[in-house]
Image (cartoon, helix red, strand yellow):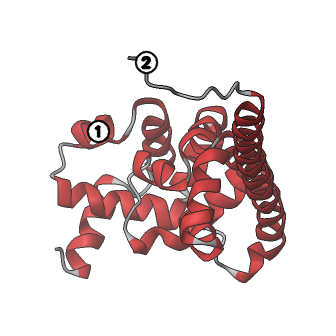
Amino acid sequence: MFKKEDQYLLIERFARGKESQLIEKYIQDGPTAVQDELELTDTEWQVIFDYLVFEHNLLYKCVSHSSEFFHDCYVKFGVAHVRSIIEVEDKKYDKIFEVIFDYLAISLEGLNYHVMQNREKYVMAFKVRGGDYIRTVLALSKEKYQDQWMQILDVLLKLVCDDMFTEQNCEHSLNAFVHLFNINREHRIITKKS
C-alpha cells in the first residue's frame, strides 16, 4: 500500500485536471481500458480509482449513464451482483454504494421488481431463515429503509400465506381423493379355491 504522499503524487501525475476525461473513458470503455492507457499497476490504479470514486462520484455517474443496464442487473440478480460488477465489494465503498442502491432500488423502483421476479427464492428463504435474513440480503437493514421493508414484508407474508394455503389444499385434496377412492372401491372376499 502507498503512503499518503505517494498517493498524492500518483493523483497529481495521472488524474488531476483529467478527471472528466478519465470518467468518460471509464464509462465508455471500462476500468481495464483506463488502467491500460495510464499504464498503471493494480495498486496504482486502485489509488486513482478511489480518488475518482470518493472525490468525483465516478460510480454514480457510471451507473446513472447506463441506468437501464444496471437496473436490469439489480432486478434479476440483486445488490451483491451490482456491487460485483462495479468492483466495490469492500466495506470502504458502503457509503458510496448506498447512493447507488437508493437510485436503483428506491428511485427506479428496482426493489419491488427484484422481489417479485425472485419471489420463490425469497419465500423459501423467508420460511427457512426468517425476515431478518431477507432484510439483510435486500440491503434494507438501515432505519431509513423501514417503509420499503414494511412493503416488502407485506408482500412476502402474503406470498408465504398463499404458498402455505396452496400446500394445505393440495394435501387435503389428496387425502379426500384417497378417502373417496377407498369408499367407492369394490371390496371382494378373497377365497381359496381348491
Front residue of this view, candidates 160 and 181: 181
What label does residue 147 carry, if any? none
What label does residue 193 carry, if any? 2
Measured as percent of width and height from the top left, residue 17 is found at 45, 54
Which residue, given by chain and number where applicable, does mark 1 sit on?
Answer: 32
Q: Nearer the viewer, mark 2 or mark 1?
A: 2
Measured as percent of width and height from the top left, residue 123 is found at 65, 55
Image-based side of 17 in relation to 70, left or right? left
Image-based side of 62 in relation to 171, left or right? left
- The part of the image, by quadrant, that contains residue 130 is bottom right
Going 45% across and 58% down the picture, which residue do you hit? 52
Q: Secondary structure at mark 2?
A: loop
Going 44% across and 48% down the picture, which residue do you hit? 86
How many numbered badges does the structure rendering display?
2
- Separation (CA) of disc 2 from disc 1: 88 Å
Going 71% across and 44% down the picture, which residue do you hit? 175
